[in-house]
Amino acid sequence: IFNDTIFSTLKPTVTQQDIDAISSPFIKGLAQCLFNNTYNRKYRVQAFTAYKTIESINSQYKIGNYNGFENPTGIAFQTNTTAIIFAKDITNTVYLKIRDFATEGTSPEKSYELKNGLNIVNITNAGLGYISYYTDDANAAPVTVNITAGIVNGIYKKGTTSAEWAEMLTNDVYPKIDIEGYYTKLVTNKSAVSNFHFTTAQPLIDKYDAIAKSEREMMGFFKFNKNFKNRQLVYMESTGGWFAGGLGVHLDLTWGLSNSTSAPGLDIWGVAHELGHINQVRPGLRWTGTTEITNNLYSLWAYYNLYSPTGANRFTRLEGEIADKTAFPKVAGNRFGEIIIQTQINGKNIMDQFRTDYVNPADANFRSLVPFWQLELYYQLAGASKGASTLAFDSDMSDEDTQSPSGPVTGVDYAHWFAIVAEKVRNTDESQLTQGQLVMNFVKNTCDAVQEDLTDFFTSTGFLKPINATISDYTNDQMTITQSMIDDVKSYVLAKGYAKPVSPVINYLSANSVNAYKNLLPVSGITGIGVQIVNNAQGQFLLVNNSQWSNAVAFETYNASNQLISVSIVGTGDTTLANTYVDYPANALNVYAVGYNGQKILVYPATNTLAVDDIKTNNNDFIVYPNPLKNGQKLVINIKNSRENLKAELYDMTGKSFISAKGSLREINKEINDKLQDLKTGIYLISINDGTNTYQSKIIKE
């Protein structure tokens, strides 16, 4: 009476009398359900496709374990029961895998091999069922299975209706539910996800998918046409913490339900961090010391693109957090200052703090992450300061069914620098290399990827600095980089004939200054204007008003011997970017603003004498005299071919405005002279804008 070999449909001529005549209670019951149209064919009768073996992904892509629980059945099984399962089209090894995710911590699991035809399976463990079908046969056909046993629990997939989802969350069949996306698969508690997504889980799985897809993009899966359909597993429990392990990513619900089960509240950094552990390309992009660093390249990229800033400035944890202090004051963004002091100023290797004999290491993982972030910013966001294409971030998961590979890039594909490095690592046998050789390969591979000579950058940031030490990174390993190895790398890059990058100060780049690098914005400011010495509990600073120092990317602090003693990236201490708290210790003297192109302007201190350029600018188009201005004298301001609608401001050296005037040059001369006599002696700045040009000069009033 059945129409197929897996007993999933009845012949159209079957009648109730035919069913009543069946002697087997099981067959009779199955036929009756089919006849009454009460058999849940959506879940019980499914075609399941083959997935690439996890082992081949490990070896070909040199990454960790992807999802071992593809093909969810949506059916929960009970212990010590018998399951009748029909199957067809099996030509490779196929199992029914049952894992009891609800028994947290241990989660018993067992696999039962399936054959074509009738399978009588004695189920010895409870849990959710999966058709485990992994093969490296690219032509493996789908298998079809009819599972007559177990209780339907459900699966959330794209297209699941609100009513179906609500039924899954409230059916009391099993406390956990499968949520399946394009790039990730979640196993989470119904009670947890229902707090935030009772009508649909799509926003949640889309957020996970966007993060996972961004990591595939960075690894070059799309660029090199190496994407595969296996997902990354994220499973949640109320114990154990957050970590990446053999199964996939484990998230602890007690660390905050919204952090893992709410799309708006999702811990973007943490999720990308754990997914990133799986996606670390090894060993070439995970040498000793970088276990908790190179996975955070993915975290930085996802966080920067997905989080919602409270103000106009978009930044990451590196720019925003107040971290531990070693040599730089404990203010927001101090990790940049710390790593610059360690590497550029003190000449240490980037892995120096990971030495087992290092006294009181602090925040080593995040500090050493800074140069990697600078490479991401420069090549993925700033277009290499050449107007090159930036790296797209796809947060819209609605069109993944129809996505097409990106077209070829003309010229150097700066945006995919990391993908090109990862591809080189995937295609190179580095298993016999030392840890130091892996670092040297990374430097060479990065220069090759962008076809630029980055040896200055890698020297400043400590990659090309000698080290011979035991490194602590969960386990201990030897890191040796000799001067000879460094010289070999420099010779290798020199022989390639690569040009230097447009910016000689990529090592000062941050999310706070990326637009200056991207749009080639020159630094500007007047010495002594908009600055003041301040002291607080964290130390002594030169407080710089950033509006007076446009497009500065960093501020260098020098001592009386003209030695560089500290560098503060723009926005240090103030994530709104209104000010920069420039490190100004007791032995500091001069501070210079640095532009994206390496141009430097003295910020502090101001001198009491005026250079010619302070008096006459723009080839004598703007003249202010007499200067210095003695008591009782009138100031004369002259602008060649002056316009009528001028705006003038007179500031003191802190940036405080004392006089504002509008009108013709004659009117401005009159108003400024009327008020100037009432001001005390000192140094002032006059600024006049004619709608096109801004003219500025210092004035000394005696």
Image (cartoon, helix red, strand yellow):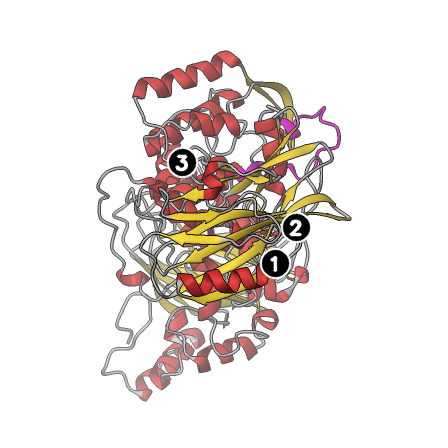
Lateral position of residue 409 relative to residue 247, left or right: left
Q: Measured along the vertical axis of the image, is residue 481 above or below residue 232?
A: above
Q: Is residue 366 visible?
A: no
Spot occupied by residue 79 in the image (x, y as percentages of width and height):
59, 63
Foreground disc of the pair 3, 1? 1
Q: Among all residues in the image, which is located at the extreme right?
A: 537
Foreground disc of the pair 3, 2? 2
Residue drawn where x is 53% and y is 14% of the image: 482
The Cα–Cα distance between marks 3 and 1, rounded to whole angstroms, is: 46 Å
Q: Earlier in the sequence, mark 3 or mark 1?
A: 3
* Dot 1: element: loop
Residue to which mark 3 is pinned? 503
Residue drawn where x is 36% and y is 47% of the image: 621
The Cα–Cα distance between marks 1 and 2, rounded to whole angstroms, is: 10 Å
Q: Amino acid at mark 2?
A: Thr
Q: Measured along the vertical axis of the image, is residue 44 above or below residue 317?
A: below
141 and 181: which one is in front? Answer: 181
Q: Quadrant of residue 96?
A: bottom left
Residue to which mark 2 is pinned? 681
The magenta-colored residue range is 351-370
Residue to which mark 1 is pinned? 677
Q: Amino acid at mark 3?
A: Ser
Which quadrant holds the N terminus?
bottom left
Q: Which mark is residue 398?
A: none
Q: Measured along the vertical axis of the image, is residue 26 above or below residue 223?
A: below
The Cα–Cα distance between marks 3 and 2, rounded to whole angstroms, is: 41 Å
